[in-house]
Structure formats: structure tokens, C-alpha cells
Image (cartoon, rainbow, N blue to C red):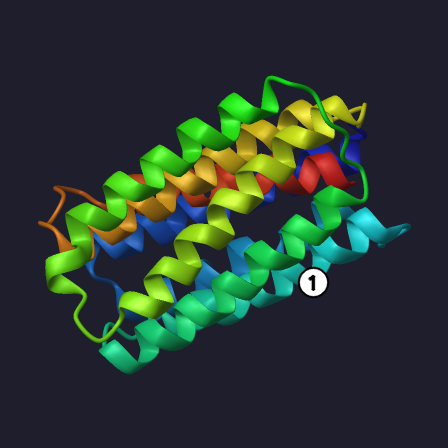
Amino acid sequence: MSTLSELAVLAVLVAGALAIFSAERRIAALHAVTKPLATALLFLVVGWPHGRLSGWIAAGIALSIVGDVALLDHGDRAFVVGLAAFLLAHLSYVVGFVTAAGWAPWLGLVILFTGAATFLVLRAIWPTTAGLHAPVVAYGLAITAMVAAAFATLAGGLPDGIYAAVGSLLFYASDASLALNRFRRPIPHAPFLTLGLYWLGQVGIAIAAR
């Protein structure tokens, strides 16, 4: 990575750390600024979109900012808006990754294991998501597809495909912990998982697209 990209990654991590700190300490004003800021700084990691992959990833980052802002509110309506924004973000990532994707037999295992994990998470939160079953299933399918498409960039020979693959897994773990924290049972110090893994995952995806 260039020095500028390294500084951009550092800026994302610093802003993300402040967002996690403010979430833990319940400093609402600081959190409202640093949470979307950390995601917006990912644009600097990607740089000016120079192809289909980077363009779609940039679109996904923009949608992620919409989701970040929506989820500053903890109400059900805001949650649905955030869910929709992140679902579209995952679909943008899928389209972007597909432009650099290939196929290998081991991708079947990735799809199998990720799909099984999604099924288990959905089963765990199913009793408490009445009225949201269709959106959460759609979201589960979208993020499963995102992970598979990210790994497919390795088969397609994307130079930094490993960042996309690892980043997608971290993003997946973040969303799974968010769902379990909200709909299953509270996780102690949840922001370290839900937000920490989220930005680490997003950084990996942005690096792959730069």
C-alpha cells in the first residue's frame, strides 16, 4: 500500500476506536460524528474509483454510511432502514466482487459453511423477529452471497483478493453478533464486536478495491 493508503487506514481505525469508545461510554454526540466518519474515511482507502470493482465498492460504502446513520437510532423503524441500506451495500459488494471473480471447487465449501452459519443465526433469532422474517432472511442471503463473492475473487486472481475474503468474514461476524445482541441476548461490550469487526472488515474490502 502507498503511504496515503496506510494513513487512510489509520484514520479509519482511529475514528472507529473513538466510535466504539463513545458507544461504550454512551457519549451520543461523539458517537453520532465518529461512527459515520469512520465509514466515510474508507473512500480515502479505495481512492478515486478507477474501474467497476472500485466503483461498486464505493457505492457500497456510501450505502453503509446511510446504514450507520440510521442505526444511531435504536428504534424498530430505524433498524429496518439500516437493514435495507446494508442489504443494498452487500449487493453492491457482490456485484463488484463478481467483476473480479473466478470459480474453484473449494468455493462450494465456502458457500456451504457460510450458508450453514447463516441458517444457525436465523434460527437463533427467529422467535424474536416476528414481522421481520422476510427482511432478515433476505439480508442473510445477501451477506452470504457477499462472502462467497469475496472468496471468488481469490479464484479470479484479484491481487488483493485475500483482503476481500478476510474482510467479508469479519463483516459477516460483525453482522451476526449485531443480530444476536439485538434479538437473542445482550452481549457484554457488544460494540467491540459489532463495530470493531465491522470496520476491520470494511477496511479489508476497501483495500481489495483500491
- Give the position of the N terminus as an image quadrant: top right
Image: 16 above or below 169: below
Image: 169 above or below 49: above
Q: What residue appears at the point 78 percent right and 38 percent down from the top-left corner?
A: 4
| Left or right: 140 in relation to 130 | right
- Give the position of the C terminus as an image quadrant: top right
Give how far across and how far down residue 132 sits, in percent. 26, 71
Image: 79 above or below 187: below
Res 63 → quadrant: bottom right
Residue 192 in view (yes/no): no
Res 97 → quadrant: top right
Give how far across and how far down residue 75 sits, in percent. 23, 77
> SS at mark 1?
helix
Q: What residue appears at the point 25 percent right and 39 percent down from the top-left corner?
A: 120
Image: 68 above or below 180: below
| Left or right: 201 in relation to 129 | right
Give how far across and how far down residue 106 sits, in percent. 59, 17
Give how far across and how far down residue 163 sits, in percent. 64, 28
How many callouts does the rendering have? 1
| Residue ranking furthest to the bottom | 77
Q: What residue appears at the point 75 percent right and 41 percent down from the top-left corner?
A: 209
Compare residues 16 and 68 and report the one nearer the observer: 68
| Residue ranking furthest to the right | 50
The residue pinned by badge 1 equals: 59
How many residues crowd around disc 1 within 10 Å: few (fewer than 14), some, or many (20 or more)?
some
The amino acid sitting under disc 1 is Ala
| Residue ranking furthest to the top | 106
